[in-house]
Image: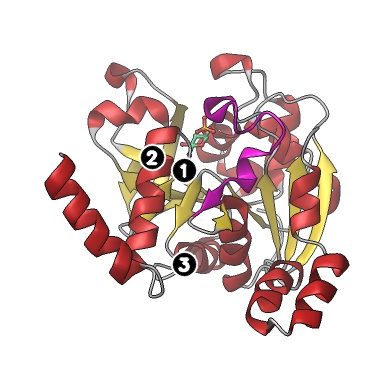
Amino acid sequence: MTQSHPRISKAVIPAAGLGTRFLPATKATPKEMLPVVDKPAIQYVVEEAVSAGLDDILMVTGRNKRPLEDHFDRNYELESALEKKGDARRLAKVQESSDLATMHYVRQGDPRGLGHAVLCAAPHVGNEPFAVLLGDDLIDPRDPLLQRMIEVQELYGGSVVALMEVAPEQVHLYGCAAVESTGDRDVVKVSGLVEKPEPADAPSNYAIIGRYVLDPAVFEVLRETEPGRGGEIQLTDALQLLAQDEKVGGPVHGVVFKGRRYDTGDRGDYLRAIVRLACEREDLGPDFRSWLRSYVTEEM
Ligand code: G1P
């Protein structure tokens, strides 16, 4: 194990993917900037990190990702136009994203997988535990998963992954964990991990959803990790090594999440996420729900 519990303050958000599932929308716009209702998907993720107390955010980006940096920066032209108009409500919306957190960026020049993206964060993170949040998974702010993962990391040390039970036919889309129970109802010990297993090889139906709190020992392991599934350096493979040899970076635990998760990773899930979130919004929800009800009755 590394050291005694420094407070976790850093979050890493990999955002270098090409977003090919959303072409042509993502030809010149990063997929992280696609709106979920009226906010770019990435802002939900940064807000989640901030509400868990992580205000130092490192985004691992790539070519064509400038809009991400601009979104979390000031926009003086827009701000002064809104000020002149006296539109305080919209001005607040513009300023919200630049006031959220301290943002840092590093480029993943050569996109060699999630494990490689996390490794790009090593110089910034240094020798302390840190969180990783994947942008395709949105966690409802009313179900604070990351806070709980940080608590569990402080309690057990090592690394913590977020797990969710999924239908057996879905397991091949995720990293999958072999688990043992602990004294805590929502915490399991992870004894093994497989990236996107065939149904026959899946050790369980516990899928990794994109939240991790990691011991910095993972960097050393990632440096040695050979390309795995899809020819990419997989974070799951590095965590498998940590789970199997606790001397390297402490144990791996899983927090079993039963709350609301919205997947924005492919077009169907993205549409479902927007509809669900729009229905729940106080400002848009009532009108949208009644329109949706009549649309479904009349059109389907
Ligand atoms: C990644 C991880 C996978 C995890 C998933 C969660 O896969 O490699 O282990 O279950 O995120 O969203 P991706 O969906 O990026 O292919």
Please report whichever mark, 1 or 3, sits nearer to the chain's N-terminal start.
Answer: 3
**CA distance separating discs 2 and 3:** 26 Å
Residue 131 is drawn in which quadrant? Answer: bottom right
- Residue 32 lies in the magenta stretch: yes
Residue 227 image point, x, y percent: 65, 18
Q: Amino acid at mark 1?
A: Thr
The picture places residue 269, in percent across and down from the top left corner, at 38, 39
- Give the camera-side residue of 31 and 172: 31
* The magenta segment: 20-36
Q: Tag on residue 269?
A: 2
How many marks overall? Answer: 3
Using the image, tell me which numbered label, if any, was put on residue 264.
1
Name the residue tied to disc 3: 148
> Residue 233, position in %: x, y?
65, 24
| Residue for point 81% across, 44% down | 66
Mark 1 or mark 2: name the one nearer the start of the chain.
1
Q: Name which residue type carries label 2.
A: Asp
Marks 1 & 2, CB-CB < 8 Å contact: yes
Q: Which is in the foreground here, disc 2 or disc 3?
A: 2
Regarding residue 3, the answer to whether it shows in the image is yes
Looking at the image, residue 58 sits to the left or right of residue 278; the answer is right
In reply to whether residue 70 is colored magenta, the answer given is: no
Residue drawn where x is 83% and y is 29% of the image: 109
**CA–CA distance in space, label 1 to label 3:** 23 Å
Please state which of residues 100 and 290 is positioned toward the viewer in this rendering. 290
